[in-house]
Amino acid sequence: MKKYVVIIQCEIAHRRCSGWACMKSFYDKSGAFKDLAEEDLKYISFTCGGCCGKGVAAKIEHFANKLAKQTDASKDEVAVYLSSCMVLDHHHYSRCPHVQMIKGILAKHDFSNIVEGTYISQKSTQKRLDGVYKDYNKIHVNEANCCTENR
């Protein structure tokens, strides 16, 4: 059973985005939150701290300290969501190149329930299917730093 949801948002995207779609998805239990059934789930969001995402370490440590001192919840009862603006291509930005490092920082601080994505835009999903937004799993980078799409 989860007691807390932490949403980590891209610092750069946060300059133009209030996090409304992520918050709405959380409360509507839609998008990446569709399987959350807990009624009394608490929600907190913060940014990665900017590129390269190293600021997550201090913020997640602060959260962990408050969690330990002021609640009866364990880290296993926390789900950390990396916002869609970090993990998916969309019309504003490309996928964060530091996602793996951020996930490593979270794991180092013993947060193991990590989910990629929050709000799922139907329009952006269609653009990904149409190839307008490239899938990072289908791109190959060779030694000459040239990218080709694996088909």
Image (cartoon, helix red, strand yellow):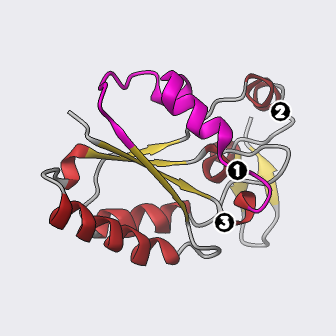
Q: Nearer the viewer, residue 134 or 90?
A: 90
Query: Quick one: which residue is furthest to the front in this view?
Result: 70
Res 11 label: 3
Question: 10 Å neighbourhood of mark 3: few (<14), some, or many (≥20)?
Answer: some
Q: Horizontal and vertical percent for residue 86?
A: 63, 53
Residue 35 counted in the magenta span: yes
Disc 2, SS: loop
Whichever of labels 1 and 3 marks the residue nearer the N terminus, that label is: 3
* Nearer the camera: disc 1 or disc 3: 1
* Nearer the camera: disc 2 or disc 1: 1
Disc 3, SS: helix
Q: List the residue tagged with mark 2.
A: 131
Question: 10 Å neighbourhood of mark 1: few (<14), some, or many (≥20)?
Answer: few
Which residue sits at x=47%, y=65%? Answer: 102
Q: Is residue 63 above or below residue 117?
A: below
Q: Is residue 2 left or right of residue 23?
A: left
Separation of marks 1 and 3 at Cα, in angstroms: 11 Å
Whichever of labels 3 and 2 marks the residue nearer the N terminus, that label is: 3
Part of the protein shown in magenta:
15-42
Which residue sits at x=76%, y=54%? Answer: 94
Whichever of labels 2 and 1 marks the residue nearer the N terminus, that label is: 1
Q: Is residue 4 above or below residue 53?
A: above
Q: Horizontal and vertical percent for residue 26?
A: 50, 32
Separation of marks 2 and 1 at Cα, in angstroms: 28 Å
